[in-house]
Image (cartoon, helix red, strand yellow):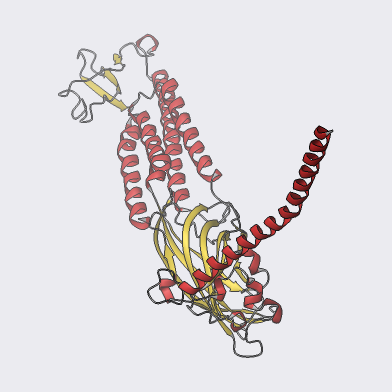
């Protein structure tokens, strides 16, 4: 009985302890949360209080609206408060827009298409008071292409351009910088292919001047005034710019007014650059081969006139080679209606080669004519077997012979080492009136056949005339 009473008392005591623990737990949690909050509040008060104490190591930076993450750029610039479809100061004087250019590269110059490709940084400077904003330290704000579409920018374009684009790797290469007083810098990286009217009359010994023209598309000089921001110093170039076929001599800028009958006057900015062509490539590829072909055609003047298989293929080969050189040069050139300097040189060289072939044709023809005359002369000469008057003694000897210098006068070995040929016909006629006299008179008839005369003169005339042509040509075009 006593044991059962003790067990009941213990059970009641346990139940009471559990109830007390359940009521005290929420109170301790509430006190713990209050302690954490109070600790955070105390730390915050210490930091704020320390900033007002002199000599405190913690300093607070003066607030700047341009760098505040809580302020949107559109709100700061008041984009929605203005109509940016209109130019700044609409209705007033023209807005001045300064321009400067940094030429990054001059990529290609094409004579066939008559154009050039250039990559450049184009920068615009103007002032738009609608974009002014408060700033305590006069710091600017820089934006990318997303804000450009929301404000007014100059509508600059390239006159006589064929293709152009703004680079977009890895993002659009556009930069907009706004200053607190409303000054704006707008920069973009552009590659443009523009027309260049070339005068190829002196090609390849020519110098070309090309121009890149910049102009506003919609705004006349009454609304927008384009100008070079720093004069001729507004154009900067990279010293490493080089072209394989041209030497860049100089860059310079000018400003002019362009008039359109339907719209009016516009400011136009010019970037001029002068290019001088490198001649060494064309010397190796065109001039030297043409000269060698002409000199090769002269070799036939020293070949025997009877060596037809040697002289004819040599002449034909040089003519065909010159034709190939002329065709190759014209294939890479535009079809202009005037004669170029290289055309003059190649066609004169072609004429010299062609004349060397004509020269051998003349030599061969004259040789044939002389052989016919020789044959006819032999037929006309009297023969002893057919003499009507036996008392008349005629002795004839004919033939080709190399005569001695003493017997042929000046004939012999010429100075140039060649051998001249002649046909010597000797006649010995006995007088029929005096049959007792033997060979009372003897006559000699010498018939000269000199078919080497044309070759001999050609050896001097052809080189001399071609040398004179080269002197005149290079003195004019160099």
Horizontally, residue 146 falls left or right of residue 107, namely right
Q: Residue at x 64, y 71 (%)?
A: 72
Taking the view exactly as shown, the residue that stands out farthest to the front is 2
Horizontally, residue 266 falls left or right of residue 352, namely right
Q: Tell me residue 206's x, y (percent).
A: 43, 57
Confirm whether residue 380 shows in the render.
yes
Q: Residue at x 66, y 60 (%)?
A: 31
* Position above or below: 457 against 431: below
Write down the quadrant of residue 66 in the picture.
Answer: bottom right
Q: Residue at x 57, y 61 (%)?
A: 194
* Position above or below: 73 against 297: below
Depth check, front residue: 456 or 473: 473
Depth check, front residue: 167 or 263: 167
Q: Tell me residue 434's x, y (percent).
A: 23, 17
Confirm whether residue 262 shows in the render.
no
Write down the quadrant of residue 441 in the picture.
Answer: top left
* Position above or below: 430 against 322: above
Quadrant containing the C terminus is bottom left
* Position above or below: 407 against 65: above
Depth check, front residue: 108 or 359: 108
């Amino acid at each position: 009985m006593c044991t059962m009473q003790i067990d009941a008392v213990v059970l009641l005591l346990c139940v009471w302890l559990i109830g007390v623990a359940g009521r005290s737990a929420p109170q301790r949690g509430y006190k713990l949360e209050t302690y954490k909050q109070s600790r955070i509040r105390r730390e915050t008060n210490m930091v704020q209080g320390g900033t007002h104490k002199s000599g405190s190591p913690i300093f607070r930076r003066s607030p700047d609206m341009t760098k505040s993450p809580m302020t949107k750029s559109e709100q700061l610039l008041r984009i929605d408060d203005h109509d940016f479809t209109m130019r700044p100061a609409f209705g007033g004087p023209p807005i001045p827009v300064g321009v400067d250019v940094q030429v990054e590269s001059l990529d290609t110059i094409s004579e066939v298409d008559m154009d050039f490709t250039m990559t450049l940084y184009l920068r615009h400077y103007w002032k738009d008071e609608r974009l002014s904003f408060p700033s305590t330290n006069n710091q600017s704000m820089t934006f990318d292409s997303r804000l450009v579409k929301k404000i007014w920018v100059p509508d600059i374009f390239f006159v006589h351009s064929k293709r152009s684009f703004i680079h977009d790797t890895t993002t659009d290469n556009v930069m907009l910088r706004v200053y607190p007083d409303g000054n704006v810098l707008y920069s973009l990286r552009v590659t443009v292919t523009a027309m260049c009217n070339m005068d190829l009359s002196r090609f390849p010994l020519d110098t070309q001047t090309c121009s890149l023209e910049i102009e506003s598309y919609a705004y006349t000089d009454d609304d927008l005034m384009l100008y070079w921001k720093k004069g001729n110093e507004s154009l900067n170039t990279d010293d490493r710019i080089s072209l394989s076929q041209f030497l860049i001599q100089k860059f310079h800028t000018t400003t002019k007014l362009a008039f359109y009958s339907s719209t009016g006057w516009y400011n136009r900015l010019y970037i001029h650059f002068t290019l001088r062509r490198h001649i060494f490539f064309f010397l190796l590829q065109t001039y030297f081969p043409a000269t060698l072909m002409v000199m090769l055609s002269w070799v036939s003047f020293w070949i025997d006139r009877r060596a037809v298989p040697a002289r004819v293929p040599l002449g034909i080969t040089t003519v065909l080679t010159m034709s190939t050189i002329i065709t190759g040069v014209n294939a890479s050139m535009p079809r202009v209606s005037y004669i170029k300097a290289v055309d003059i040189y190649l066609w004169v060289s072609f004429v010299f080669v062609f004349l060397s072939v004509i020269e051998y044709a003349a030599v061969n023809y004259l040789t044939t004519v002389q052989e016919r005359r020789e044959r006819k002369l032999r037929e006309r000469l009297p023969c002893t077997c057919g003499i009507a008057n036996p008392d008349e003694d005629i002795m004839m000897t004919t033939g080709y012979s190399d005569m001695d210098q003493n017997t042929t006068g000046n004939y012999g070995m010429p100075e140039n080492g060649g051998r001249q040929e002649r046909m010597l016909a000797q006649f010995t006629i006995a007088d029929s009136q005096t049959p007792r006299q033997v060979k009372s008179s003897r006559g000699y008839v010498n018939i000269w056949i000199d078919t080497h005369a044309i070759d001999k003169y050609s050896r001097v005339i052809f080189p001399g005339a071609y040398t004179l042509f080269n002197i005149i040509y290079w003195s004019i075009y160099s």
